[in-house]
Image: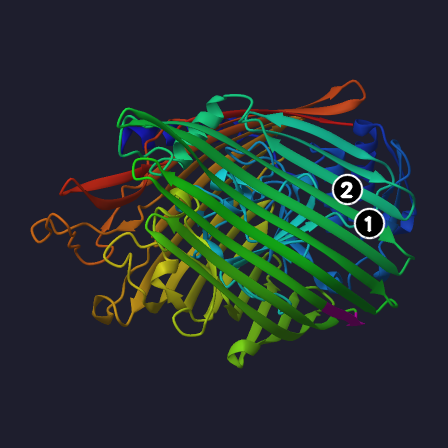
Amino acid sequence: MSKTLKTSLFLLLFFLCAFSGFSQNQKRPLTEVLSLIEAKHNVSFSYADKDVKHILIDVSTEKSLDSILDEISLKTNLQFNKIDQQYYTIVKQTESDSFSLQHLEEVIITDYLTSGIYKNNTGSISIKPEQFGILPGLIEADVLQTIQALPGVLSVDETVSNINVRGGTHDQNLFLYDGIKMYQSGHFFGLISAFNPQLTHKISVIKNGTSAKYGDGISSIVDMQLSDKISSDSNIGLGLNLISADGYAKVPLGKKTEIQVAARRSVTDILDTPTYNNYFDRVFQDTDLTNTEDAAVSKNEHFYFYDTAIKFLYDLSEKDKIRFNFLNIYNALDYNEEATINTTNEASNSQLKQHNIASGITYERQWNTKLNTFAQIYYSNYDLDATNFDILNNQRLIQENEVVDGGLKLHANYYLSPTLNINGGFQFTEVGISNLEDVNNPVFRSYIKRVIRTYSGFAEAQFQSKNKNTSVRLGIRNNYFKKFNLHLVEPRLHINQRFLNYFSAELSAEYKSQSTTQIIDLQKDFLGIEKRRWVLANNTTIPVVKSKQASFGLSYNKNKLLITAEAYIKKVNGITTRSQGFQNQYQFVNAIGNYEIKGVDILINKQFQKFGTWLSYSYSKNDYTFEDLNGGASFPNNFDITHVIDFAGTFTLDDLKLALGLNWHSGRPFTTPNYEDSNNNTIIYQSPNNSRLDDYLRTDFSATYQFNLGKNKAILGASIWNLLNQKNTINTYYAINDGEISKIENQSLGITPNVSFKFRF
């Protein structure tokens, strides 16, 4: 065992032992819990005795008031209505309070990893940023960093723009922002989530057994939903950390309208912080910004990002709602190059811009206590532009990748009985993707644009027994790709069965497809920073990607001890070599194949009153098969990570929260050269992915403290990513330099501190 691993384990075990003596929560009468909350938070509840009588609950009163009330609402059929800063009313929820489908979706596991993370009987994982506790290395609920803590979810290069769910590539994840598909997920070219958590009310993560209403996303669905309820008073906040500043406001304009606004901007072009310097070294290593053919060339970079979000809520009546939302995400990098060539001073400016705009309008009507309808029109536009000057060779390269996605959704939910819900609908999408390359020396220009229209219909039934022990969702979806005259029928299934009081079994299965993928033409495209570009299927060299998956899991949940184990098998057909990021003998080969992954995810989680700890382990075997490559024999997937272990502990004492965690996984595959057969111009490789990188190890720490600042609340946070400054190699490939084979290694993010301050009023 290495010295670093021993040190990491010692720190973590010390942290666990130091706080493991705290007693666990016990179920108590709700009336008793409400009295404790009233005394601690100086509030008062008004309710009918018959509504809360005989209810027992195991909620911790050490959290914030909002978190406690939200958890009680999740575990009961009660709704808290805020009258003013002190007084609340408690009423039973009625059938018209929410979508029909939600009546049969029940939280079966709270504090799945930490507070604010839940598992539902539909198989999805729900994350609520407002209730988010703490995770190692995070000081806020960064959406895409948070989901990487879930078993079966990993990023092989530590970025949120390369998330691998059960062995899939990042483009096989569907990211929805209030129902709108997003094509950009990261700021700082992958190190920070592009989605500001301040307005996000709930994130649903689905790995299998997906609802038939979802298309695309053959590996996972990440459905981000903004707050949809008009508040009784304003909620405003400001924040600052070593990377960005942000602010948000939720302001009711009346009883029927509300405006929600959030904005965030980097401070990296104003302040030179240690966090930025470490991020810069990590993101821009082995790119045009750090690579130069001549030491005489000097570069001066300028980088920043921002995002803005707006949502407008208008309740036409008690039964009719209209919502409008808008999101703008932007990254910009430019750098100047200066060099002296033949005694002449030369200068040029290279730049990269990444932009995603999304907007949509929805209309929802609750016709009666049984029928609900929903309609949405949306538009999403992604644009990636790069201008790259090679000052030494007097060359200018312009590249552009643009996606225009527009669509219509019509859904209906019918609450047939207290145990059966039926929903169905129609969806239309039109996606156009264009790619441009323009070179001045030698003169070359290529522009390719494709458009696909997809018509989809779905129907689904969800059943839940009266005792809530049995939950079944069965659906079917039909996608018609008009351009190819192609019908794809996709059945979906999820079953959850409780037994012996504390056990449950879960069966999930699905067929899915998608027509958009990301490919890499050259590793140095788009300055080598955002080298992946979106493309559309053409049903020949780029097929419609299809997947089928099945999984079975068992769980035990009693006295705040959770043990889960889930085995799965997934096969994906229609992938191309260019979508997999090969950097070996297949880098410039165009071939079509598939991958198959088999694995198991295990989670053990124990929660006490103030302390929580979890251990997760994932095992998988992920192999490619390309008929035209490697003699048709299977070989390891580029994202085949055989073993993954996450071990973490959290501690909460009043308003102080601490977290310490250990992340370890086996190395990813790479291909080594055959030095004897290689020559000065060509590398002859051994069998594909014949070697593996060294194991990856990282220890993270974070802490937050909430306190009153006058009449308002403030939160101070601090985190250290890679606490022990472990040197991890996350990618290895080979190139020929000066007639010799050079080994190139990309390193992970080193020790990186961050601090934050948030103010809410």
- Report the span colored magenta: 410-417
Looking at the image, which is closer to me, 390 or 214? 390
Circles 2 and 1 in contact, beta carbons < 8 Å: yes
Q: Please tell me whether mark 1 sits on a helix, a strand or a loop.
A: strand
Q: Quadrant of residue 34?
A: top right
Tag 1 residue: 313
How far apart marks 2 and 1 lie (CA) works out to 8 Å
Which residue corresponds to the image point at 44% horizontal and 26% vertical from the top-left? 277
Give coordinates of residue 388: x percent, y percent.
41, 41
Give coordinates of residue 238: x percent, y percent.
70, 28
Q: Disc number at residue 260?
A: 2
Q: Is residue 189 visible?
A: yes
Which residue corresponds to the image point at 39% horizontal and 39% vertical from the top-left? 389
Give coordinates of residue 684: x percent, y percent.
15, 54
Looking at the image, which is closer to me, 253 or 50? 253
Q: Quadrant of residue 380?
A: bottom right
Disc 1: CA contacts within 10 A as few (<14), some (14-19) or many (>=20): many
Furthest-left residue in this view: 676
Q: Quadrant of residue 470?
A: bottom right
Does the stretch in magenta take in 572? Answer: no
Q: Say what amino acid the circle numbered 2 marks.
A: Gln
